[in-house]
Image (cartoon, rainbow, N blue to C red):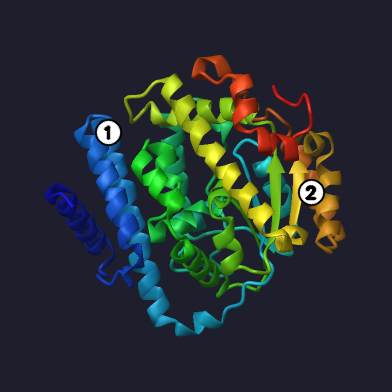
Amino acid sequence: MPTAVRRYQREACEEATRETGFDDFGSDEHLDAFSKLAESICTAVEQGVINPEGAALAREKLVRCLVTRLRLVDYWKAHPELEAEEIRQPIFIIGLPRTGTTVLHGLMHCDPELRSPLNWETFYPVPPSTPETYHSDPRIELRAAESEEFSQSIPGMQGIHKLSATMPDECVMLFDAALASIHLPVFFDLPDYQLWYEGCDKGHSYRVHRQSLQILQSTHPRKRWLLKSPQHLFSIEALFREYPDARVIQTHRHPFTVLASMSSLAYMIQSTVLKTSRQEVGQQQSAVWQRGVDHTLRFRRKHPEFEQQIFDVEFGQFMTDELGMVQRIYEYFDMEPSAEAHARMREYMTQHPRGKDGGHSYSAADFGIDEADIERRFADYIGKFVPPSSAG
């Protein structure tokens, strides 16, 4: 490993230690991820791919991952009883980005019997809040300020992906303490790290994920976890290995539409910190998400024993009748929503009409995304999960 990379790692560890006062990073299971991530960032900076502002942001995000790991390890050592915390039949919403996962997540989060990690909890899971501080924890205000700063730095972001510290959020940030996640490549094009991540064993990441949930629920009445992230497409075997009784909802939409939308979002973020073009981002996103859906498709074909634990949701059908689709999901998994859950879901639909936060304009051609090419590359996925004439 180059000396510059080792120094970069050492300085990041020292900064995280100063911030927390802790120096025990736990097992060595995160070191491969740490090395590959640091090397990828250093290479991008050295080659001038990342601008100075982006380099500072990448360093900040890397240190935050280490800070979270230090706090998690310290809290876990102080509370060995957490090992007995049970995670029963968690529900995971997975699928390509821009396939209705956020709406579905928001609707099901209305059920008082389900619990999703809130945005501020995914960024600051340790220590857990208490029922008394759940809505007043000072980390809420901290995270709200960070979200506002991020949104202001990227005009139009709220119209594409609304950010709020107190909204249910993806569980992708719970992988950060393992330093193995697709979170950073979304911000910074790190192809070597992305490919390493896709091929690595993700057992440690999901153990860290479970530990984070055990910590979060330890101070609250036990509820069934409702989780979501496109990242699970790349690691569904690790998901079922760690949570063998999991219930999975996979959302589907024609990749041509998905990739145009996701490329627009990725370019909006990456262009502030990278030297990149729309065409490059389009190629990057198409390749990454093709590998993601192919991975899950192969797993499902190889492991039919898990099919009864997976419910598929087609985007067009969901958007036609959101509440009806949620009812079908509940019936499939032998769940019974209460009258309160139904009322909250109806209120959610009233308060969150489509387009409330603004539109999202993009052109597939701007990103070099060709429908015929996407049809060819995603042929297996489209043939199994996407109805004809659903592109666009």
- In this rendering, position of residue 168 left or right of residue 55: right
- In this rendering, position of residue 91 left or right of residue 177: right
Residue 343 location in percent, x, y?
83, 51
User: For residue 53, which numbered disc appears in the image?
Assistant: 1
Q: Give the residue type that dot 2 points to.
A: Met
On-image quarter of the C terminus: top right
Which of the two labelled residues, at mark 2 and mark 1, occupies the earlier sequence position?
A: 1
**Residue at image point 53% right, 41% down:** 291
Q: CA distance from mark 2 to mark 1?
A: 41 Å
Residue 167 location in percent, x, y?
59, 49
Count of number-bearing discs = 2
**Residue at image point 46% right, 34% down:** 151
Tell me the residue that label 2 is attached to. Answer: 345
Q: Secondary structure at mark 2?
A: helix
Contact, mark 2 vs mark 1 (Cβ under 8 Å): no
Front-most of residues 251 and 369: 369
Q: Few, some or many C-alpha atoms within 10 Å of disc 2 (few <14, some 14-19, many ≥20)?
A: many
Residue 326 location in percent, x, y?
81, 49
